[in-house]
Image (cartoon, helix red, strand yellow):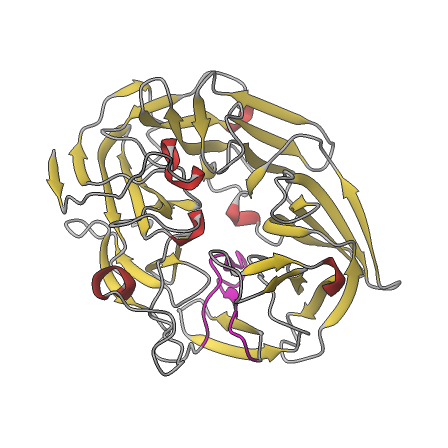
Amino acid sequence: MTTTSPTTASASDAPAPHMAGNFAPVTDELTAYDLPVTGTIPPELTGWFLRNGPNPRDAATPHWFFGDGMVHGLRLEGGRAVSYRNRWVRTATLTEGARPVDAQGRRNLAAGVANTHVVRHAGRTLALVESSFPYEIDCRPGHELETIGVHDFGGRLTTAMTAHPKTCPVTGELHFFGYGGPTPPYLTYHRADASGELVLSRPIDVPGPTMMHDFHLTARHVVFMDLPVVFDHSRPGMPYRWDPEYGARLGVLRRDDPRGAVRWLSIDPCYVFHALNAHDEGDRRIVLHVARYADFGDGTPAHLWRWTIDLDTGTVAEEQLDDCFCEFPRVDDRLAGQPARFGHATTAELPGTGPIPGALLRYDLEKGGVVRHDFGPGRTPGEAVFAPADDRPGGPGWLLTYVYDASTDASDLVVLDTEDISADPVATVHLPQRVPYGFHGNWLPDPAS
């Protein structure tokens, strides 16, 4: 095992919740090989499991969302845990101290922490945060997780990029948006083709600057969520506030008319960080599943809800599906924008909530019901990513997640069989250091030869 770039994270006698326990950063970049495994890693799993999250390098940050991005990667091949490594994303903010706004008030979209997600499109692996450009990282043998640099689609991208782009499994197109900034346009919709070329950027008129973290894609529509968390530069730390007077609405845009009118439909005030999935139901209905908060910033947990848009009446039916707290909802990405029977979500602590029994949830979105995997006292999972067992979308597979054990102050990669997630793990890979709680990641299988 080798160690590089040691640093010292700041600490205090009473750290903020997002700097305490397993929210606190790790200080070293490690590389370890031939990791110990309990159980058997499915031999079909050959590729990278990557997860991004905030890991402040030199100092505490005023909010969990603002730490420097660090990608944790586990390489699996032929039933072996070949290697683990963690690397900071070498953004201009990390290496040069770049600021989002310079002394002349100009926005620098290369200045960001790239700490929220890591996705692959058109052969590029991108670390994302919604306030800036993405950064490309290298997953080639011998270059694992090194930062290549800013990716702005050959200079065509002129806004920030959401951390939650959607890849259409039919066309291979990447759909995304950019928001932010104190002046219009507050929202811009983008589309890149399957080869990675940015082919569409169109502003969308919204009343004001809101925090738009995620959106929805179906086979025929794009649906935006304009929700009442509004930009407020006077607030220290997180520069947004809950303002139910702003209203809440969903904006529907036809994919075959991407420069056409956006139809806005009102819903009850709420906030959504993360969408599970969406699909068209016939010609005139759109079904959306979301992790919905009744409020923002008051500690109220999110629950799974279904919204059904009726395009004939211009109304949205809103229905809570479960009373269990859930976040980080995911689906088999090969069914993104298509009807999917199953969805998965995580129950775990967030900064300030205190300990919550960690569990993964598997929802049957067609027949109802939920199956739960509890990890036991002090064991907390992160987001669970679906890895397929074969080429059938919606077929069998595994859930991969990093799990922190408070009793040992260590982390594992846990592999669960989706056919029965309540059963014991198929495999547990024991990691050389803990993985702090973070945000999102992906299973990136090796391309077929």
Residue 204, compared with residue 91, is above or below; it is: below
Residue 357: x and y, percent? Answer: 53, 23
Residue at the farthest bottom position:
104
Q: For the point 75% across and 62% down, which residue is it?
A: 245
| Residue 61 lies in the magenta-colored region | no
Q: Is residue 283 visible?
A: no
Residue 190: x and y, percent? Answer: 52, 72
Q: Nearer the viewer, residue 148 or 437?
A: 437
Residue 384, compared with residue 152, is above or below; it is: above
Question: Mainly helix, strand or loop, the magenta region?
Answer: loop
Residue 359: x and y, percent? Answer: 53, 26
Residue 348, compared with residue 253, is above or below; it is: above
* Residue extent of the magenta highlight: 159-183
Q: Determine whether, in the image, residue 362 is placed left or right of residue 107.
A: right
Q: Determine whether, in the image, residue 427 is placed left or right of residue 138.
A: right
Residue at the farthest front position:
13
Residue at the farthest right position:
313
Residue 287: x and y, percent? Answer: 73, 51
Q: For the point 56% across and 36% down, which residue is it?
A: 345
Q: Nearer the viewer, residue 232 or 116?
A: 232
Q: Determine whether, in the image, residue 92 is placed left or right of residue 397.
A: left
Position of the N terminus, as image quadrant, is: top left
